[in-house]
Every structure is written in C-alpha cells, then in structure tokens.
Image (cartoon, rainbow, N blue to C red):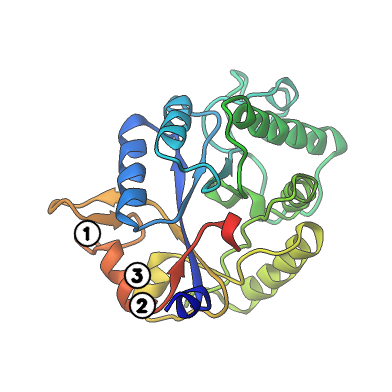
Amino acid sequence: MKDSQANAPRVIVNADDFGLDPDYNQLTLRAFKSGVISSATLMANMPAFEDACQLAHRHELLGRIGLHFNLTYGPALSAAIRRQPLFCDAQGQFDLNLPRSTLRLPQPAAAAVLQELEAQWERCLAQGLRPSHIDSHQHVHNLWPVAAIVARFAARQGVPVRLARNVGSNIGLVKWLFKTALNRRIRWLSGASADSVCTPRDLLEGLRPGGVIEVVAHPTQLADGDIGDDYLPAQQSLERLLAQALPGYRRVAYSEL
C-alpha cells in the first residue's frame, strides 16, 4: 500500500496570497488542515505577512510555504524600485505600467526588480521561513524579462519556479507558443518544476493535465462552511472537484518533488 501511494501521480494544490489579511490567513490554514491544499505562497509586503509566518511556524507548515513575488499591489520593500515609474507611483506603492508584450527592461529597472525580489525573500528569511518555491501575484513573473530575473534568482536559491499556466481551453495558438517558449526558458534557467499548471476552473471544464500538476488556488469560504475557490462558481466545493477530477493523485508540496 505504501509503495502504491509513493508511486501515485502527484499534484500540488497551492493557495496564493497567504499574508493578504488575517481572515484569508485563517482560511488558508483551514484549507491546509483539511487537506484541500498542499502548499501556499506568501506575500511579503502585505499587512498580515507576520501573522502568516507565525501560523506557518505554529502549525508546522515550513517546507510548504513559498514566496508569492509581488510587483503589482501594496508598498514596495526596496528603495530602487520606488523610483521606477514602470513599477511604482510617487508614493512608493506598486502600480505596474509594464505592457505584457515587453521583452526587455532597461538595466536600472531590471536591477530594481532583482533588489525587490531579494528584499521580499530576505523578509521571509528574517521570520525563520525559507520559501520552498517562487510564483507571483497576478502572474507578473510570466512577463518575459521578469521571468528571467526570477528564474535565475530561484536557481541560486535552489528552489523551483511556477511555470506559466499551460492547460486551458482559452489558450489559443499565439498564447500557447508564447507560454511554451516562456516555460522552456524558466526550466532552462531554474530547473525542474511541475509539468502542468492549471486553475480549478480548468478541471471543472473537464481538462485533465499530465505529469506533475500544480493547481493554482485562491480559497474562499462557502455558505455551508466548505471551501470554494475564486475561479469556481458559487457553492462549488474545491475539495469535491479535486477528488472527482484527479482521483488517485497524491497531494504534495514542491519540497517533496
């Protein structure tokens, strides 16, 4: 039985936005305890960051918490990026003004992105929490020049990076070609990751990814006390969907790959 479980297909169910606010932290913790999710990623510049770190320590979640790199919401942690109008407003709040089609950053802007990534990573370390992997808020690391910065940094830290979502009925040819090139670049620069990345809605639509799967989750509280997801219709249970869509899969964290 143990050998059968060890050889079962693996799925990472990751809750983004840990640290956003105290209520969401508690919902994320409940999703962990019930087994709905197997990992979460932490927003180092959000007001409930320290609360999330305390919960991770108290409930033995170290090794299951990654960094949710943020360039789009809240205050910047480093000085250089506050002076970059591509990323911040005059008050030092993130206000991304980088088109998705951007292929290159000016050198000062690229250096500022790296400094901010380092600052967010170091803030986690200062709380005694070493991130197990890196993804990003609103998929900012899927921007071509940001992807390289994040992937090279992750390689130096020895941690994986989430690939761009590569499963979905709304991925047309042009988008598929871009995502394929981007994911090859991330893999080449940072090493192994999950093979397939999808949302709960992709599973609801009947899509069945292959290989090691990452399901990008944003848990919500349902009226009946169950856990839903921002990507799902109201009253759709995330747990029941995962059980139906991915039978036989073993939920793991990135640190267990």
Tag 2: amino acid: Ala
Residue 205 visible in the current orientation: no
Viewer-side label of 1, 3 = 3
CA distance separating discs 3 and 2: 5 Å
Q: Which residue is mark 3?
A: 242
Establish if 81 lies above or below 117: above
| Image quadrant containing the N terminus | bottom left
Q: Nearer the viewer, mark 1 or mark 2?
A: 2
Q: Position of residue 248 (x, y in %)?
A: 40, 79
Q: Position of residue 224 (x, y in %)?
A: 12, 54
The residue where tag 2 is placed is 245
Question: Considering only vertical position in the picture, is 230 above or below 168?
Answer: above
The residue beneath circle 1 is 234
Q: Of marks 1 and 2, which one's residue comes earlier in the chain? A: 1
**Mark 3: secondary structure:** helix
Kind of element beneath mark 2: helix
**Mark 3 and 2 residues: CB-CB less than 8 Å, in contact?**
yes
Q: Earlier in the sequence, mark 1 or mark 3?
A: 1
